[in-house]
Image (tube, grey):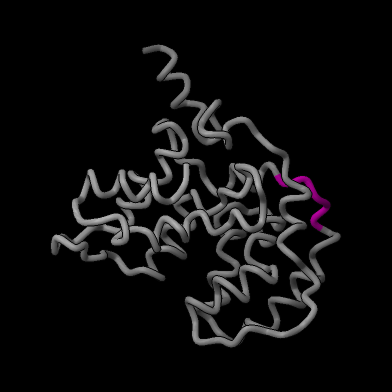
Amino acid sequence: MNATKHCKISVRRWGGIDDDYRAVHDFIDSTKVLCADSRHRIFHTMWAVNYIIVPLFGDTIVNSDGVNVDVKDLCERDHLLVDYANKFIPTLNDFVCAIEIDSSSIRQPIERLHSHYSSNPLLSNLLLSPLDITGKFESLLLTHNSWFLNTIATRLFDIERRLIDFEIAPDITFENMRFESWMDNGLTYPPSAKKLQTITNRN
């Protein structure tokens, strides 16, 4: 589903016009530049909503009708759930569990890259948050790459883009990520939603 369709869902729910919501919906799907299929949906998680999208756009936006719209609700109800057939919202760990890579091969490049940002505690916490949440070192590929640091981190923090050859490009993440059917519009359920699937099947 493209951003325009998500915007129309938001208009029906909250009022206003399409352009009131376009920046948020475009941002959630900005990862399409990294991967052409549904594996790109790493921002379709509550990790991204809580750690990136709300800090970037604020807790609320005011639409053209003067209505305060909760950004977290907007993301969840009008984008994330919709893209998974209103069945579930996957966790960051669901995506990370699909990454198949020897973590020892990326440890030193990630540590070297992180050292350039470790003096900024807030940024460092964001960059390490995937590891905090999943406990898996390979999760740091999601934040320790040229795209995240130069495109996302620079919007959230007062830092300059680095004009260097990065050791880690975002392609590494997706080249080593299995495509799972749950990523494709909720055709199946991810590991985090297996109990929900059982309940749904009983009903």
In this view, the residue farthest toward the right is: 105
Q: Would you say residue 101 sits in the magenta stretch?
A: yes
Question: Would you place residue 119 above or below residue 81 in this image?
Answer: below
In this view, the residue farthest toward the left is: 66
Question: Would you place residue 69 above or below residue 2 in this image?
Answer: below
Q: Would you say residue 187 sits in the magenta stretch?
A: no
In-front residue for pair 159/67 = 67
User: Residue 150's spot in the image, x, y percent?
Assistant: 62, 76
On the rendered structure, is 117 left or right of 103? left
On the rendered structure, is 176 left or right of 182? right
Q: How many marks?
A: 0
In-front residue for pair 84/1 = 1
On the rendered structure, is 133 left or right of 117? left
Which residues fall within the magenta stretch?
Answer: 99-103
- Name the residue at 31% across, 46% down: 8
User: Residue 69's spot in the image, x, y percent?
Assistant: 23, 58
Q: Quadrant of the C terminus?
A: top left
- Name the residue at 61% across, 49% down: 40
- Name the residue at 20% across, 56% down: 16
Dominant SS of magenta comes to: loop
On the rendered structure, is 82 left or right of 155? left
In this view, the residue farthest toward the top is: 202
User: Residue 6's spot in the image, x, y percent?
Assistant: 38, 47
In-front residue for pair 10/94 = 10
Question: Would you place residue 76 above or below residue 33 in this image?
Answer: above
User: Residue 178's spot in the image, x, y percent?
Assistant: 72, 40
- Name the residue at 54% across, 77% down: 123
The quadrant holding residue 152 is: bottom right
